[in-house]
Image (tube, helix red, strand yellow):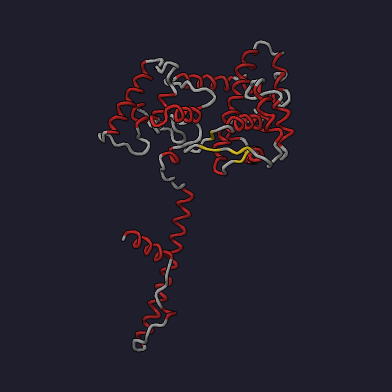
């Protein structure tokens, strides 16, 4: 895919809804020929992009997802895998990325795409709902990548009663967030690097530390009593862990204890986009039902093969015994099966 034409036309119009920052940042990217002189991305200890290339990656990812993914898809899960693979290839053409960061990059794109749809809905469609003439065409600064028929379909879906009801419910859920952070575009990854540089040895490598720092105002204070109380609990639990009176395990760490609610299965508080309970806490992944069925089938097949081999061996041994205890030839020694090999390995590791 030649990404330069797609990117250059969009970079002149919008980056995350803002006209000013896109062109300045994208000049460097436009000069990069696909797969030549790519920008190298470095990562922190939990796999999040950091350093000088981080913002370029975020900007370019936002441009590409808005250019290639129609806003009429109801959810990111409905976007075809072929489009997601094209997005990943487009980003790889400009950036030297770790192959394992594909999930992070696509998740970042999904977030940017959802934010863009929300921005169009709130700032343009709902703001001009009483003036349908303005809604006949896409916003002027987005015309270059919002086709007319796509825009019409999007507007129709957003002003429907069902969507408005769903949107209201989502707004109510967001309003229940008791502890909003004060992070800017830098996110948790940027905050982490800032704190490591400014605090040096005083930096505490724990997500509870990042969580509290992300909610401090410029004076190092908290704006409400509830957040202040959680921060106090974090400090108390940290002291207990240091003196050995508290032992944490897995997801039941200091932050979870302080907040009093369990972690969501797919993401972690206090870390930002990327890390999951599985990767951060080194929790083994559970096999799916399909994987379990396949494993059971393999084991059953192995056991059946062993039964047949044992029967053949018993038959041969009886014949040998009938002939007067003839020496057992190499060809009739007990067979070495996969189960036997696994048993030998387990015994070896237990010694």
* Residue 297 % position (x, y): 46, 58
| Residue closest to the far top | 130
16 left or right of 190?
right
> Foreground residue, 213 or 145?
213
193 left or right of 145?
left
* Residue 349 % position (x, y): 35, 59
Q: Quadrant of residue 256?
A: top left
Q: Residue at x 45, y 41 (%)?
A: 279
Q: Residue at x 67, y 23 (%)?
A: 14
Quadrant including the C terminus: bottom left
Quadrant including the N terminus: top right
Q: Quadrant of residue 250?
A: top left
Determine whether 273 is above or below 82 in the image: above
Q: Would residue 80 be seen by someone viewing this image from the given angle?
A: no
Determine whether 159 is above or below 262 in the image: above
Q: Quadrant of residue 330?
A: bottom left
Q: Would residue 329 be seen by someone viewing this image from the given angle?
A: yes
Count of numbered tags: 0
| Residue closest to the far bottom | 324
* Residue 232 % position (x, y): 33, 22
Q: Residue at x 69, y 42 (%)?
A: 36
* Residue 219 % position (x, y): 42, 15
Q: Residue at x 48, y 19 (%)?
A: 172
> Foreground residue, 347 or 340?
347
| Residue closest to the far left | 245
């Amino acid at each position: 895919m030649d990404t330069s034409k797609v990117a250059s036309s969009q970079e002149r119009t919008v980056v995350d809804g803002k006209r000013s920052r896109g062109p300045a940042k994208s000049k460097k990217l436009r000069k990069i020929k696909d797969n030549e002189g790519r920008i190298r991305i470095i990562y922190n200890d939990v796999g999040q992009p950091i350093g000088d290339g981080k913002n370029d990656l975020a900007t370019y990812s936002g441009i590409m997802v808005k250019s290639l993914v129609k806003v009429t898809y109801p959810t990111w899960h409905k976007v075809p895998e072929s489009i997601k693979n094209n997005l990943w290839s487009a980003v790889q053409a400009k950036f030297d990325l770790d192959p394992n960061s594909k999930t992070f990059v696509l998740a970042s794109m999904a977030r940017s795409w959802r934010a863009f749809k929300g921005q169009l809905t709130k700032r343009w469609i709902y703001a001009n709902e009483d003036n349908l003439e303005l809604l006949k065409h896409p916003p002027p600064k987005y015309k270059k990548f919002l086709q007319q028929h796509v825009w019409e379909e999007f507007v129709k879906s957003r002003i429907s009663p069902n969507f408005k009801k769903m949107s209201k419910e989502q707004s109510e859920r967001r309003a229940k967030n008791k502890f909003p952070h004060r992070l800017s575009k830098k996110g948790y990854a940027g905050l982490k690097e800032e704190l490591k540089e400014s605090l040096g040895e005083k930096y505490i490598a724990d997500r509870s530390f990042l969580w509290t720092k992300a909610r401090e105002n410029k004076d190092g204070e908290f704006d409400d009593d509830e957040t202040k109380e959680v921060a106090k609990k974090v400090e108390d639990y940290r002291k207990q862990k240091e003196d050995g009176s508290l032992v944490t395990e897995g997801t039941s760490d200091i932050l979870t204890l302080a907040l009093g609610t369990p972690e969501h299965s797919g993401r972690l508080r206090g870390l930002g986009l990327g890390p999951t309970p599985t990767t951060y806490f080194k929790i083994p992944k559970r096999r799916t039902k399909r994987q379990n069925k396949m494993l059971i089938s393999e084991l059953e097949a192995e056991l059946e093969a062993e039964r047949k081999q044992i029967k053949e061996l018993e038959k041969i041994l009886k014949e040998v015994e009938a002939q007067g205890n003839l020496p057992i030839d190499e060809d009739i020694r007990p067979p070495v099966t996969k189960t036997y090999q696994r048993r030998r390995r387990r015994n070896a590791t237990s010694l």
